[in-house]
Image (cartoon, rainbow, N blue to C red):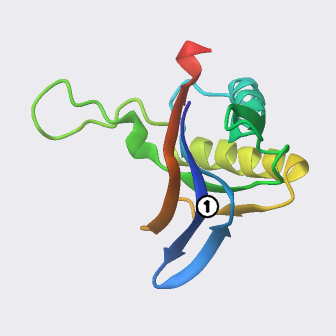
Amino acid sequence: MKFVIQRVSEGQVSVDGKVCGTVGRGFVVLVGIGKEDSREIADKMLKKLLGLRIFPDENDKTNLSLKDVGGGLLLISQFTLFADCKHGNRPSFFNAGEPDKAKELYDYIVKACRAEIPEVGEGVFGEHMKLSLVNEGPFTVILDSDEL
């Protein structure tokens, strides 16, 4: 599983010109689910995501978490995080999770986040989406379950 986490002041996602998810101050998280991923892996990733201290405190040190600042989440499914570009110029997505299993895990992640964070927006799994955001810092962190 891979998360690309961007600290934002705002973000929104739309499908077919209709906004389906927004966030103010918080994180936009691109969620990539691989073939071997499970709920146990998702739980470890979520614990790390929700515990990340990447917001500045009163001394401008990155000491505050999403909950500390009352931030929200915008979660976007993105199988392309599993692109393999080792051979040729056309990426392979062999290691991306099968759509049905990936959707089930993505829905699990969204539900788990909603149990912890009051503001959680989301994209539409499997749809062509347009994402816009204002990255603060810029500050971007990549979490990979293979490294946890």
Position above or below: 29 against 18: above
Which residue is tagged 1? 9
- The residue carrying pointer 1 sits among few (fewer than 14), some (14 to 19) or many (20 or more) residues within 10 Å by Cα, namely some
At x 45%, y 82%, the residue is: 16
Relative image position of residue 147 (x, y in whole percent): 55, 14
Residue lying furthest bottom in this view?
A: 17
Residue at the top extreme, as displayed: 147
Q: Amino acid at mark 1?
A: Ser
Tell me the quadrant of the picture where the N terminus can be found.
top right
Query: Residue extending furthest left?
Result: 88
Q: Residue at x 58, y 43 (%)?
A: 102
Image side of residue 84 versus residue 14, left or right = left
Q: Position of residue 106 (x, y in %)?
A: 65, 47
Task: Judge from the rendering whether residue 37 lies leftward or rightward of residue 118; answer left or right.
Answer: left
Residue 131 located left or right of residue 48:
left
Q: Secondary structure at mark 1?
A: strand
- Note whether 143 is above or below 66 in the view shown: above
How far from the left and from the top, in percent, is residue 121? 70, 64
Q: Is 113 situated above or below 2?
A: below
Q: Nearer the viewer, residue 77 or 95?
A: 77
What residue is at 61 percent from the left and 41 percent from the top? 101
- Quadrant containing the C terminus in the rendered view: top right
- State how many labels appear: 1
Give whichever of 136, 37 is nearer the camera.
136
Residue 127 in sight in this render: no
Looking at the image, which is closer to me, 122 or 104?
Answer: 122
The residue sitting at the right extreme is: 115
* Place of residue 42 in the rendered image (x, y in percent of width and height, measured from the top left): 70, 31
